[in-house]
């Protein structure tokens, strides 16, 4: 009888011990699953927020580039009314426009591509430049082009060009340029971007057209792709995928490992072949959205 009672006690102890261990293991497993879901949700939110920032940035760039054409179109309309480009009155008007819009060059080209500045200086022939041809032949009504340098100005700049028309016919091409250092604070002023978020405007070939201070601290060269060749893409993503996304104007998100693991969002714009790249440290984003 005592042996049966002892065996019963041992069995009860075994059941209790087993139950405690079982529920402990279940608890750990459930906690692990919960942590995994929480981490996935945090990562998903971080990617979503970065993607939203990229889309907002694309809209901002499009809007600000469009705004740059307003004073230039005003001047083109004035010239289209029969006013000459080289007169004292026109020069006074352009002086005011240069000051208020921080233009660094204002030029006028005939349909052969021969150009002069509003001060009468010969600027050479631009007949081979895409921005001139597309305006002169009527295929574009306005065009912006990135110039890394010219024989006149060494600093990179954006050049804006529009047609001068008389009775609906293109008679000349008018252009003005603005330095990148002037344009960057305007194009990349995104109040919704989180701290330590790198923002780039790049062309299809990877040329960095402009970037914010965080972006510049990450990528010190002038080509976004060259920098990313030094690291590796995660999640079966590649540089070719990024190039294709930009070329086909797709939104893409991916992770990239260089010095840190970064979440990167790519968003196309409606300007030329330009795209927005927004990137941030994955751990920092997850701390913010955890």
Image (spheres, rainbow, N blue to C red):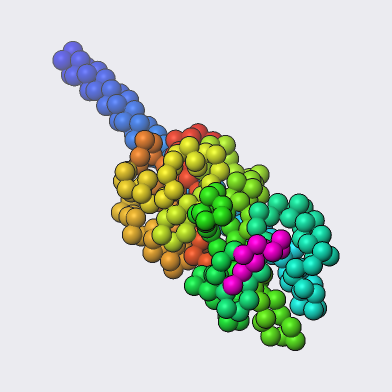
| Farthest-out residue, top | 2
| Farthest-out residue, right | 89
Residue 118 percent location from the top left of the image? 71, 63
> Residue 119, located in which quarter of the rendered image?
bottom right
**In this orientation, does residue 113 appear?**
yes
Q: Which residues are magenta?
A: 114-122
Residue 48 percent location from the top left of the image? 52, 50
Name above or below for residue 9 compared with residue 261: above
Name above or below for residue 259 compared with residue 45: above
Residue drawn 74% across the image and 83% down it: 166
**Quarter that holds the N terminus:** top left
**In this orientation, does residue 285 appear?**
no
The answer to whether residue 147 is magenta is no
| Farthest-out residue, front | 121
In-image side of 102 versus 132 (left or right) = right
> Residue 6, located in which quarter of the rendered image?
top left
The answer to whether residue 118 is magenta is yes
In-image side of 44 versus 69 (left or right) = left
Residue 183 percent location from the top left of the image? 63, 50
Residue drawn 48% across the image and 51% down it: 208
Residue drawn 79% across the image and 67% down it: 87
Residue 181 percent location from the top left of the image? 60, 46
């Amino acid at each position: 009888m005592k042996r049966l009672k002892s065996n019963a006690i041992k069995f009860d102890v075994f059941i209790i011990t087993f139950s405690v261990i079982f529920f402990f293991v279940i608890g750990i497993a459930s906690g692990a699953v919960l942590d995994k879901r929480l981490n996935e949700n945090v990562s998903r939110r971080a990617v979503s927020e970065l993607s939203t920032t990229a889309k907002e940035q694309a809209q901002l760039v499009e809007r600000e580039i469009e705004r740059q054409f307003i004073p230039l179109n005003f001047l083109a309309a004035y010239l289209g009314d029969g006013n000459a480009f080289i007169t004292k009155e026109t020069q006074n008007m352009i002086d005011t426009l240069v000051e208020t819009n921080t233009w660094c060059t204002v030029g006028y080209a005939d349909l052969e591509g021969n150009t002069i500045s509003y001060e009468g200086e010969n600027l050479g022939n631009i007949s081979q430049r895409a921005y001139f041809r597309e305006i002169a032949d009527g295929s574009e009504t306005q065009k912006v082009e990135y110039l890394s340098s010219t024989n006149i100005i060494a600093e990179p700049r954006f050049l804006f060009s529009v047609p001068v028309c008389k009775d609906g016919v293109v008679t000349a091409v008018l252009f003005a340029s603005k330095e990148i250092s002037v344009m960057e604070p305007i194009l990349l002023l995104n109040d919704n971007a989180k701290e330590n978020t790198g923002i780039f405007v790049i062309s299809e070939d990877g040329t960095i057209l402009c970037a914010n201070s965080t972006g510049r601290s990450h990528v010190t060269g002038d080509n976004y792709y060259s920098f990313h060749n030094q690291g590796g893409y995660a999640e079966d993503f590649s540089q070719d995928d990024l190039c294709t996304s930009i070329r086909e104007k797709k939104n893409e998100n991916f992770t990239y490992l260089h010095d840190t693991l970064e979440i990167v969002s790519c968003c196309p714009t409606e300007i030329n072949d330009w795209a927005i790249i927004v990137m941030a440290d994955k751990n920092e984003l997850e701390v913010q959205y955890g």
